[in-house]
Image: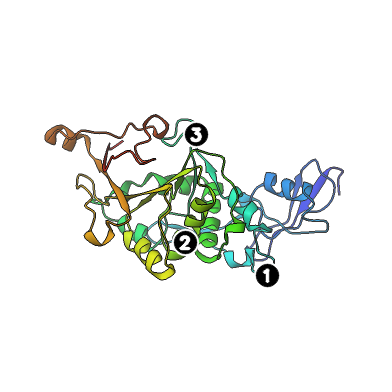
Amino acid sequence: MEKNTIKYNVYSAWKNIENKIIVDGENGYCDYPNTITIEHAKLLYRNGIFKTKQITVRNSDIKRIKDKNGNLYFDFDFSILWNKEKRTYDGIPYKDYILYSITVHNDGDKMESFKSISGVPFNCYCDKKALNPEFICYDCYSRKQLKRYIDLHFKCAKNEFFYNNVELTIDDIPYINDCFFRFESFGELTTPEKVKNYFLICEKNKNCFFAFFTKLPFIVDTAFKKYGLKKPDNCKFILSSPLKNIKAIIPDAYKYFIDATFTVFTKQYVKEHNIIINCLKKCINCLKCYGKNGVIELFEIEK
């Protein structure tokens, strides 16, 4: 072994992958079951989490499967990352994983300077709607972005399993030092368990205001009824219209928790119907989706 290297062996869940030698600036072995970036592996090693040989894989070694409709899924059992007894996921305590699961949105992005936690836009609802050009999902920016960036896709896929399956407690939740935060910037609220875990994050971070966007309000309604949840005061639920040029309407059964609606219009429709667009395209310059400001209808023009 050359000096200043760590050998990264590949976990058996991946097929036809050769062992890798990665020049890393640290001495020793790091043998962790699923670290997708060199930086993450180095952090774990330096923090003393691994003191003996572990296993890891690089992001370039992760296998994605494409179905007949072009949807991408990882050929990986995410449950192997979860240790219920030690209360760890991906080898680190729940609290540390929650911080790791946060996405910081880059300059030039609509959500520039914002942070979010999100799952994936590849599920039975999104996949079906993405096939129909009448639905906004047909041109979904998130699906295109995650198909392009495998690191981001894998991170969101890990989040999808974690927030849908792990039963968090208030002690597992870290403090978030932000004024505004977004849930599901890429994905969707897919289970009541995910809603319950997100509510705990809101409860622990009363200094921060959280925005929930969803096209599936029945999931949230089920979470309230199944777990007896109370809506946090520092969050806002926004019902997104799945169709372009058709305003979202809040069903009576969900008015007790939905605060506003969000609809995307085409440029032609805006011109023909004199629609007043009140989404400013940059969240940091707008903030209508964040805070209790009395805005109940949000209109965005198609890119």
Q: Residues within 10 Å of mark 2 (few under 14, many from 20)?
A: many
* Residue found at x 51% / y 56%: 200
Q: Secondary structure at mark 3?
A: loop
Q: Secondary structure at mark 2?
A: helix
Mark sitting earlier along the chain (2/3): 3
Measured in 3D between alpha carbons, the distance from the residue under mark 2 to the one under mark 1, in whole angstroms, is: 21 Å
Q: Are marks 3 and 1 in contact (CB under 8 Å)?
A: no
Residue nearer the viewer, 217 or 149: 217
Quadrant of the frame with the C terminus? top left
* Residue found at x 77% / y 43%: 23
Q: How many marks?
A: 3
- Which-is-in-front pick, marks 2 and 1? 2
Query: x and y percent of residue 82 in the render?
Result: 63, 65
Position of residue 292 relative to residue 191, above or below, is above
Residue nearer the viewer, 278 or 80: 278
Q: Amino acid at mark 2?
A: Lys
Residue sticking out furthest to the left: 272
Measured in 3D between alpha carbons, the distance from the residue under mark 2 to the one under mark 3, in whole angstroms, is: 26 Å
Q: Please tell me the numbered disc located at residue 113.
A: 3
Q: Amino acid at mark 3?
A: Ser
Q: Which residue is mark 1?
A: 85
Query: x and y percent of residue 123 in the render?
Result: 41, 61
Mark sitting earlier along the chain (3/1): 1
Measured in 3D between alpha carbons, the distance from the residue under mark 3 to the one under mark 1, in whole angstroms, is: 36 Å
Q: Which residue is mark 2?
A: 196
Residue nearer the viewer, 295 or 301: 295
Q: Amino acid at mark 1?
A: Glu
Q: Is residue 89 left or right of residue 48?
A: left
